[in-house]
Amino acid sequence: MASSVSTFEKVSVFARDPSGVQGVSREDADGGVQDKVGKRALILLDSRALDRECLARTLTNHGLGMDVIAFGSIEEWREKKDRCPPTGAVLLNMGARKVTEISPDISKLASEFRPLPVVVLSDNDDITQILKVLESGARGYIPTSVGVEVCIEAIGLAIAGGTFVPASSILAVRHLIETGKPEPAPLAGMFTLRQAEVVQALRKGKANKIIAYELNLRESTVKVHIRNIMKKLKASNRTEVAYKLNDLFAGDAGYP
């Protein structure tokens, strides 16, 4: 394909049925999301070209049942919207950005596309950030730690009128309420609620399988949390994580 082809045209190819008819997916006959929105498309907004094109292809190949049209920004969509099929929903990938950086953009998107749903995809599963995103008008919050099937179900739920929130974040809040304990000072502002729970388990030397069982998580999700903890601590391996955590909590009574 020539390099002069626009992002819109490239991603439209990803979303096509093998028959070459744009706007009709292979899952249409099986009753996918397509049935709920007719010939409407999912608008994917992500400033990172490789990420958005890979995500568009993945959603389509895993049975989203809608065309996926990807843009680097809302401004780019506005320039090309006359050539796009009708919109069914918007997926905004905010990556690792904090909600304080992007909250005004979410509010504008929610207002511009209302009553169509705007769903946010993020690397962060902190409950405080999730609540702020929903307060800004989003109709769903998908952490990148979930699988593509969950992502597709979340989009379908938003289109049907529901709101998706990751179960892990709800369980973290429930745990905090039930224990009635404030977050320990060394963890405040450094880790999300889920990461803080994983940190405590790591300090006790628990294996990933045990952590996953006790926190009601998949083992793969625990691994994602550990990788993020390693990044925040600038640690290169699990042993170094334990060493740095012990230094972090040195002299902190009640958290051996």
Image (spheres, rainbow, N blue to C red):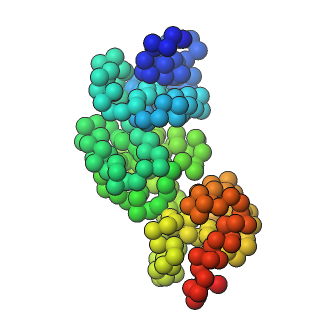
Q: Position of residue 220 (x, y in %)?
A: 67, 53
64 up-or-down from 22: above or below: below
In-front residue for pair 246/43: 246
Is residue 38 among what the camera can see?
A: no
Residue at the bottom extreme of this rendering: 253
Residue 154: percent from left, percent from top: 48, 45
Q: Is residue 40 left or right of residue 196?
A: left
Residue placed most toward the observer, 252 or 182: 252
Left or right of 50? Residue 222 is right
Residue drawn at x 68%, y 71% is: 242
Who is closer to the viewer here, 2 or 165?
2
In the picture, the quarter occupied by the N terminus is: top right
**Residue in the image at 67% along x and 66% along y:** 241
Query: Which x, y percent locates residue 74?
Result: 32, 33
Is residue 197 visible in this depiction of the protein?
A: yes
Residue 103 location (% of width, % of height): 32, 51
Write the residue at 47% across / 72% down: 188
Which quadrant holds residue 161?
Answer: top left
Placement of 99 over or under 205, stated as above or below: above
